[in-house]
Image (spheres, coloured by chain):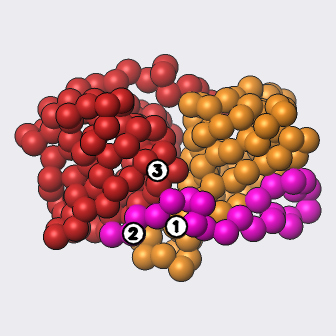
Chain colours: A red, B orange
Amino acid sequence: MIVKNYQEIPAEKVEMAGAENVTIRWLLGKDSPAPNFYLRLFEVRPGGHSPYHTHAMEHEIFILEGIGRINAKGETFPVSAGSFALVEPDEEHQFENTGETVFKFLCIIPIEK
Amino acid sequence: MIVKNYQEIPAEKVEMAGAENVTIRWLLGKDSPAPNFYLRLFEVRPGGHSPYHTHAMEHEIFILEGIGRINAKGETFPVSAGSFALVEPDEEHQFENTGETVFKFLCIIPIEK
């Protein structure tokens, strides 16, 4: 059993091209015994966004704080605390802060085996 | 892409023996295209708890609101908003509301294949 607070986990700057003002905390990542999926917490500062990109793994998302939108191919979805999403494999997506406070969300991904 | 608010998903009473005052919302469950894991939201009312039990699948947990504790074999972990946990396969566990407001948490489980 692992029990912690997310604030115990360092926030690392996301350096990927196209990311602006985003940090990631790997709550349950490679260094944990998580057997099937990883739990990460993203914080996007006002004006920030993740890259607009696509990949083979899905995301499951839950918005914790702030307001933003999920940009997809030809569509945009406004989200706020309590919103959740499934980004299916190979779907284009971007998470963007549209508010004036931190936009904070959980993102769960499968472990590649 | 699926984007919704958790309140759009009905809260179903957990009828399992040992559960008291608990509901579950299957945010991304069997009826969704989630490929690898399911996202559920539990709400435990004051005085309530999940069953003390064990099973082969892990849980990844993130506490959204309220205060409570996770009871494990010979240990108990106080938790509140921002706490997260990994309940490893076959670990005994129970989620208990120790506060006076709803204790709300996300619980992600693998899809059995």
> Earlier along the polypeptide chain: callout 1 or callout 2?
2
Q: Residue B14, which numbered label?
A: none
- For the residue pair B60 and B57, the one nearer the viewer reads as B60
Q: Is residue A2 left or right of residue A50?
A: right
- Do the residues bearing badges 3 and 1 touch, measured as CB atoms within 8 Å? no
Q: Which residue is mark 1?
A: B28
- Where is residue B19 drawn, in percent x and y? 87, 56
Q: Is residue B21 left or right of residue B103?
A: right
Q: Chain of mark 2?
A: B
Q: Chain of mark 3?
A: A
Question: What whole-number distance in Å separates the C-alpha atoms at marks 1 and 2?
Answer: 9 Å
The residue at 87%/46% (across/down) is B48
Which quadrant: the N terminus of chain A? top right
- For the residue pair B51 and A95, the one nearer the viewer reads as A95
Q: Which residue is mark 2?
A: B2
Question: What whole-number distance in Å separates the C-alpha atoms at marks 3 and 1?
Answer: 11 Å
- Do the residues bearing badges 1 and 2 touch, measured as CB atoms within 8 Å? yes
- Where is residue B63 drawn, in percent x and y? 62, 38
Note whether B60 is above or below B14 in the view shown.
above
Amino acid at dot 3: Phe
Q: Which residue is mark 3?
A: A62
The residue at 83%/46% (across/down) is B45
